[in-house]
Image (spheres, rainbow, N blue to C red):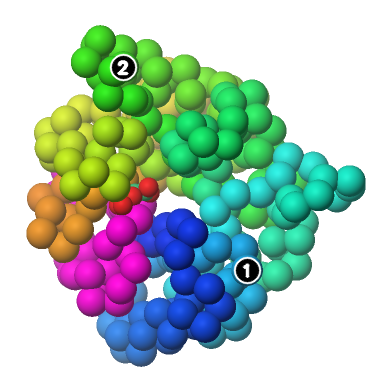
């Protein structure tokens, strides 16, 4: 009952012309394919208008990678949820580990950004995940549930299923190391259990939890077979159409 949802996070790659070319390649490849999987891409801000325009009426969803907590104001260099909505963007990543580690997005800021998404009519993709040292110290569940509580704690139950969760162990991002399907499943079950404890049953049943961290064509199928893995957030392997399509094939 939870449709798989695969999102390509292009990070700081693909200016407008390259982004348009990749979007066009995906559009062509996915035209006429059965739409049993939801597919999205998250280009950098500067490329969003080109990609939104290219993917109009294709069913391929467009996400931003970040947003500011406020709607407008004297925040030089920032982009608000309201602006993204005006640009035709539907989803927004929040709390990606690179934002948390390199740009100071604390749990408190991540919570504000989740609320900013709702205020702007954007659907958040909330990333959570532990560092290698935290896993080695056996703290991975504590870290992930702390991140969830901070970001989702004040939402109404009926808002939560509009949030896509992405479990991304930081040690697996861009390293070529993937969590094993069982390691990932274990954490996804923990996350679903956490939702079950705090919200009415429909929330845990319907909220999608993506896995992220070195997902590629060769490991997607076995990850996607796990009962609590509802899709993937893909970095490196989303940067060319062939690799990304191989991951979609793994969802069948
Ligand atoms: P990766 O990135 O697939 O390159 O590991 C995943 C992510 O950061 O979302």
Residue 247 image label? none
Q: Which residue is mark 1?
A: 46
What are the residue bounds of the magenta stretch? 224-252
Q: Is residue 102 above or below residue 26?
A: above
Mark 1 falls on what kind of element?
A: helix
Identify which residue is drawn at 30% across, 43% down: 173
**Residue 225 shown left or right of residue 89 in the figure:** left
Position of the C terminus by quadrant:
bottom left
Q: Tell me: is circle 2 under 8 Å from ligand 1.
A: no
Q: Distance between the Cα atoms at labels 1 and 2?
A: 35 Å
**Residue 109 shown left or right of residue 91 in the figure:** right
Neighbour tally class for label 1: few under 14, some 14-19, many 20 plus, Cα within 10 Å: few
Say which quarter of the image contains residue 89.
bottom right
Which mark is first along the chain, 2 or 1? 1
Q: Is residue 215 above or below residue 127?
A: below
Q: 159 and 75: which one is in front?
A: 75
Identify which residue is drawn at 27% across, 33% down: 171
Q: 135 and 155: which one is in front?
A: 135
The number of numbered badges drawn on the structure is 2
Is any part of residue 36 visible from this angle?
no
Q: Is residue 74 above or below residue 150?
A: below
Residue 78 % position (x, y): 74, 51
């Amino acid at each position: 009952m939870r449709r798989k949802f695969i999102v390509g996070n292009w990070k700081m790659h693909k200016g407008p012309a390259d982004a348009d070319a990749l979007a066009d390649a995906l559009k062509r490849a996915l035209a006429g394919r059965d739409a049993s999987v939801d597919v999205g891409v998250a280009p950098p801000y500067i490329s969003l208008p080109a990609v939104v325009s290219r993917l109009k009426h294709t069913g391929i969803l467009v996400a931003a990678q970040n947003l500011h907590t406020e709607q407008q104001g004297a925040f030089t260099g920032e982009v608000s949820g309201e602006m993204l909505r005006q640009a035709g963007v539907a989803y927004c990543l929040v709390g990606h580990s690179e934002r948390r580690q390199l740009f100071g997005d604390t749990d408190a800021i991540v919570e504000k950004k989740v609320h900013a998404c709702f205020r702007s009519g954007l659907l958040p993709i909330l990333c959570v995940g532990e560092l290698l040292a935290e896993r080695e110290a056996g703290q991975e569940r504590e870290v992930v549930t702390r991140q969830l509580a901070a970001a989702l704690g004040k939402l109404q139950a009926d808002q939560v299923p509009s949030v896509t969760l992405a479990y991304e162990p930081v040690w697996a991002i861009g390293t070529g190391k993937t969590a094993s399907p069982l390691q990932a499943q274990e954490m996804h079950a923990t996350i679903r259990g956490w939702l079950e404890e705090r919200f009415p049953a429909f929330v845990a049943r319907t909220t999608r939890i993506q896995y992220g961290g070195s997902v590629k064509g060769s490991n997607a199928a076995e990850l996607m077979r796990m009962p609590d893995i509802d899709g993937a957030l893909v970095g490196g392997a989303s940067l060319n159409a062939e690799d990304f399509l191989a991951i979609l094939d793994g969802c069948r």
